[in-house]
Image (cartoon, helix red, strand yellow):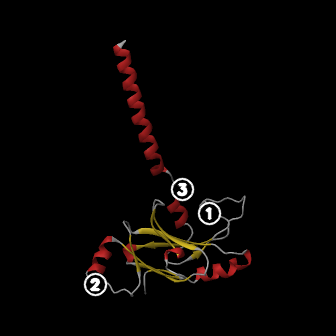
């Protein structure tokens, strides 16, 4: 009886270890990830206004059809990246994501920023240079330190009326994103 109980407990522990290992490794084996979908959009160092998602259509990025989206993919190994421009006077948010789709920084116009977005995104080495005043930045620049070099920025806009959506998306397309020239 004791021997059977030990075998049962051992089997449950081994099964639990195998189960947890499988769950944790499956995402690493996925061929289609958020990063691969973003990379396929050709938004490298430029703000790309995403096509509107119609209800019922495929939505691989799981976007809200009521919002307008701008996407920019950046690589900090090329140098610091900057996001700059003026967004409409309505709700908007900016989020910086790593390759795994994890938000590393997020802000909205309700954080007291107003309509102007002026953000510098730096890796750890660039932040050290910034602290040593070896990188010149404009006063008032919002500084974001990223743990990795491969990132993407997603800007969301909420037009109060459908008639304003086209104008909002035009303003979104004028946001600059990427290294400074």
Q: CA distance from mark 1 to mark 2?
A: 39 Å
Reading the chain from its start, which is encountered first: label 1 or label 2?
A: 1
Is residue 75 found left or right of 66 in the rendered image? Answer: left
Q: Quadrant of residue 40?
A: bottom right
**Which residue appears at 44% of the width and 37% of the height?**
19
Task: Tell me the residue that label 2 is attached to.
Answer: 134
Q: Residue at x 51, y 54 (%)?
A: 31
Q: Which quadrant of the figure contains the N terminus? A: top left
- Left or right of 109 on screen, residue 16: left
Q: Quadrant of residue 119?
A: bottom left
Helix, strand or loop at mark 3: loop
Q: Secondary structure at mark 1?
A: loop
Asked whether the beta carbons under mark 3 and mark 1 sit within 8 Å of each other, the answer is no
Residue 154 drawn at (x, y percent): 53, 70
Of circles 2 and 3, the one toward us is 2
Q: Nearer the viewer, mark 3 or mark 1?
A: 1
**Image quadrant containing the C terminus:** bottom left
- Give residue 32's mark: 3
**Numbered marks: total:** 3
Residue 86 in picture, x, y percent from top left:
55, 84
Rendering coords of residue 131 (x, y %) = 28, 79
């Amino acid at each position: 009886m004791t021997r059977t109980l030990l075998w049962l407990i051992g089997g449950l522990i081994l099964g639990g270890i195998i189960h947890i290992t499988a769950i944790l490794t499956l995402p690493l084996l996925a061929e289609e990830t958020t990063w691969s979908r973003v990379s396929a959009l050709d938004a490298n160092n430029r703000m790309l206004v995403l096509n509107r998602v119609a209800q019922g259509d495929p939505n691989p990025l799981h976007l809200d059809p009521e919002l307008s989206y701008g996407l920019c993919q950046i690589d900090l190994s090329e140098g610091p990246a900057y996001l700059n421009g003026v967004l409409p006077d309505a709700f908007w948010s900016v989020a910086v994501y790593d390759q795994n789709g994890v938000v590393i920084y997020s802000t909205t116009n309700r954080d007291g920023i107003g309509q102007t977005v002026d953000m510098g995104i730096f890796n750890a080495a660039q932040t050290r240079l910034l602290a040593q005043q070896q990188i010149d930045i404009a006063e008032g620049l919002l500084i974001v330190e990223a743990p990795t070099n491969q990132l993407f920025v997603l800007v969301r806009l909420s037009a109060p009326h459908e008639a304003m959506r086209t104008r909002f998306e035009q303003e979104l397309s004028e946001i600059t994103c990427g290294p400074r020239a």
